[in-house]
Amino acid sequence: MSDSASKPRPQYRNISVPQILGYHLPLAGKTSILHRISGALLFLCLPLVILPLFALSVTSPESFAAMKAWVDNPLFKLVLLVLMWGYFHHFCAGVRYLILDLHIGVDKVSAQKSAGVVLGVSLALTVICGLKLFGAW
């Protein structure tokens, strides 16, 4: 006879919210999720923020002054800072995934290191551009 009949079968139950919150992704998983979030953020903000600002900046000198008045608002600067982070993270993670597609750094340790580099570089670039945006220099 077969031994598989005597083994207990796994039981699948509904997952509760505390179980979901208690699950910790590795750094590469967090980077992947942030890559998707930043891509969605950029895609959704393209027609709402990016294209209207670009249109205002190139139409006439008066519309450029109106766009500059919008950008001088500190709340709008925070929106631009989030968009900058989204762009930097999406770009850096995209380069990481292209390198992974070449089968370079696909082992666990290298993948964790490259995910850390993506997060570090994207945050560093965001801080540098944020300091420039808010007039630190």
Image: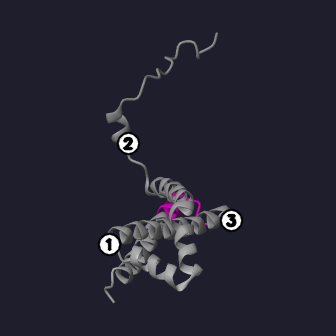
Would you call the spot at circle 2 few (<14 residues within 10 Å), some (14-19), or many (20 or more)? few
Relative to residue 36, is residue 11 depicted above or below?
A: above
Residue 101 visible? The answer is yes
Q: Secondary structure at mark 3?
A: loop
Pointer 2 residue: 23
Check residue 84 for magenta coloring. Answer: no
User: Which residue is at the far bottom?
Assistant: 137
Residue 90: percent from the left, percent from the top? Answer: 53, 65
- The image's mark for residue 102 is 3
User: Looking at numbered disc 1 in the image, what kind of residue is underneath it?
Assistant: Pro
Residue 23: percent from the left, percent from the top? Answer: 38, 42
Q: Which quarter of the rendered picture does the C terminus lie within?
A: bottom left
User: What is the number of callouts on the image?
Assistant: 3
Q: Is residue 37 left or right of residue 137?
A: right
Stretch of the chain drawn in magenta: 104-112
Residue 28: percent from the left, percent from the top? Answer: 48, 57
The image quarter containing residue 99 is bottom right
Between discs 2 and 1, the one toward the N terminus: 2
Relative to residue 23, is residue 84 depicted above or below?
A: below
User: Looking at numbered disc 3 in the image, what kind of residue is underneath it?
Assistant: Leu
Q: Secondary structure at mark 1?
A: helix
Between discs 2 and 3, the one toward the N terminus: 2
The image quarter containing residue 116 is bottom left
Q: Disc 2 vs disc 3: Cβ atoms closer than 8 Å?
A: no
